[in-house]
Every structure is written in structure tokens, then in C-alpha cells.
């Protein structure tokens, strides 16, 4: 596995962990009564997270997705 792939895998694991941690924190705060409306709106939170992940994936540009037309033909 090359270095770029390892960094990408590590980044994905960190992001996944942060998402799980955030969801757990929201549910904990809901159980403690800090967020009283969580019992009705938790599906909306999952939808927002899903949309954010899709937008992030669409915007992400790696070396294989860079625009090659910016490179002069003599390089």
C-alpha cells in the first residue's frame, strides 16, 4: 500500500470515528435533557450527516482528479 493510500485510509477512519462520537454525544445530551427535542429529530440529524458526507465526497479532489489541461504540453 502506498503512502497516499495509507493517509487516505487513516483520514477516513478519523472522520468515521468523529461521526460516531458526535452521534453518541447528541444522544447522550438528549438523554440528559440538554437537547429535549432529539427524540423527534434524530432522523434529520442522520440525513444532514449523510448529505454532508456526499457533498464532501463530491468536492474532494485528489491527484487523480486534478485538471490536466492546466499543464503546458511541453511538460
Image (spheres, grey):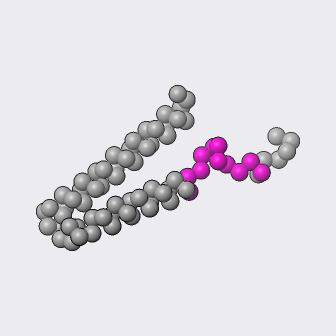
Task: Left or right? Give the position of 70 relative to 1.
Answer: right
Task: Left or right? Give the position of 54 relative to 33.
Answer: right
Q: How far across and how far down the image is residue 5, in percent? A: 52, 35
* Residue found 86% across the figure and 42% down from its top: 74
Q: In the rendered image of this protein, does residue 9 appear above or below residue 32?
A: above
Task: Left or right? Give the position of 69 relative to 13.
Answer: right
Task: Left or right? Give the position of 27 relative to 4.
Answer: left
Locate residue 2: give its quadrant. top right
* Residue found 21% across the figure and 59% down from its top: 27
State the residue lying farthest toward the top. Answer: 1
Q: Which residues are magenta?
A: 59-69
Q: How far across and how far down the image is residue 7, in percent? A: 49, 37
Locate residue 51: give its quadrant. bottom left
* Residue found 14% across the figure and 61% down from its top: 31
Q: How far across and how far down the image is residue 10, in percent? A: 43, 38
Instruction: Judge by depth and name the residue closer to the eye, 25 or 51.
Output: 51
Q: In the rendered image of this protein, does residue 7 appear above or below residue 49?
A: above
Q: Is residue 62 magenta?
A: yes
Amino acid at each position: 500500500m502506498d503512502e497516499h493510500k495509507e493517509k487516505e485510509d487513516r483520514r477516513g477512519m478519523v472522520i468515521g470515528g468523529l461521526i460516531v462520537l458526535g452521534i453518541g454525544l447528541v444522544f447522550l445530551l438528549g438523554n440528559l435533557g440538554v437537547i429535549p427535542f432529539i427524540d423527534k429529530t434524530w432522523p434529520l440529524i442522520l440525513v444532514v450527516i449523510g448529505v454532508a458526507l456526499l457533498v464532501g465526497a463530491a468536492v474532494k479532489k485528489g491527484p487523480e482528479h486534478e485538471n490536466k489541461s492546466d499543464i503546458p504540453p511541453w511538460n
